[in-house]
Image (spheres, grey):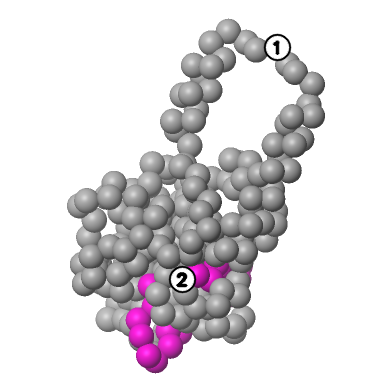
Amino acid sequence: MIRHHPDENLLLEYASGSLARGPSLVVAAHVQMCADCRSQLSTLNNLGGSLLNGSPAQPLQANAFERLMERISQIPEKIIHKSEDTPTPVPVGREPAMDHLPKVLNKLLASNPNRRWKTLTRNLQMCRLKSGQRDYEVAFHCLRSGSGLPKHDHRGQEFALVLHGSFSDHNGIYGRGDFVLREPGQVHRPIATQDMDCLCFSAVAAPVSLTGIRGLFLNPLIPFRPG
């Protein structure tokens, strides 16, 4: 059961196309996994269409259609809102815990054929992805079952989605399909549950900052590559 969702304001940003590319990928993947958010997003889209239909007509500028098509080709692909909740499968065993993913992430993987998983610690692996933008680092993270990350805070917004397994912090438990938003200054320590590895997909605006004495030595070494 999915318990954590984007709020209505964030869904509205996504529906209107004003949400940045990195966070849009996370929200899109969540909506593909969550029937409740698909329904809410459909309502917002219908409302936006009604408001648009009721607006007075405006004269078009020269080459308006060509410029519109160019802009459409540059924005993230929106979701086809179908009734089924089953994500598209990818080959089992190809990568850590990635036997099923939302369609939008399978498409992102297809555009990153040369991706590599990197071991950051003995318990954490990371796979960065190119997503056609420079504001957010977009990546998969796989945390070994029963292990935790060091306590850290966030220098920028982090949008994340649990794809497999679950983790907990002082705010609660997050399982498959749960959406997580962390704001700058929020401190937490994620711990994966004992029964399985936890795979997350995230878009991060700035590198995390480890707290305490450990952070004095390790923070300068934490990699951050938006793309």
- The residue most toward the top is 62
Residue 45 appears in the picture as rendered: yes
Q: Which mark is residue 59?
A: 1
Residue 128 coordinates in the image, percent (x, y): 32, 57
Q: Amino acid at mark 1?
A: Pro
Residue 207 appears in the picture as rendered: no
Asked if residue 226 lies left or right of residue 28, the reply is left
102 in the magenta segment: no
Pick the front one: 84 or 131? 84
State the SS at label 1: loop
How many other residues sit within 10 Å of disc 2, few (<14), some (14-19) or many (≥20)?
many
Task: Report how far apart the C-alphas of labels 1 and 2 lie in the structure.
Answer: 46 Å
Residue 224 coordinates in the image, percent (x, y): 38, 57
The residue stretch that appears in magenta = 177-199
State the SS at label 2: strand
How many other residues sit within 10 Å of disc 1, few (<14), some (14-19) or many (≥20)?
few
Residue 36 occupies quadrant: bottom right
- The residue most toward the front is 83
Total numbered badges shown on the rendered structure: 2
Residue 85 coordinates in the image, percent (x, y): 48, 64
Q: Residue at x 46, y 71 (%)?
A: 162
Q: Residue at x 79, y 21 (%)?
A: 56
Q: Amino acid at mark 2?
A: Val
Pick the front one: 164 or 209? 164
Of the 4 image quadrants, the one containing the N terminus is bottom right
Residue 84 coordinates in the image, percent (x, y): 48, 61
Asked if residue 94 lies left or right of residue 212, the reply is left
Asked if residue 187 lies left or right of residue 87, the reply is right
Q: Point out the frontmost of discs 1 and 2.
A: 1
Residue with the mark numbered 2: 162
First in sequence: mark 1 or mark 2? 1
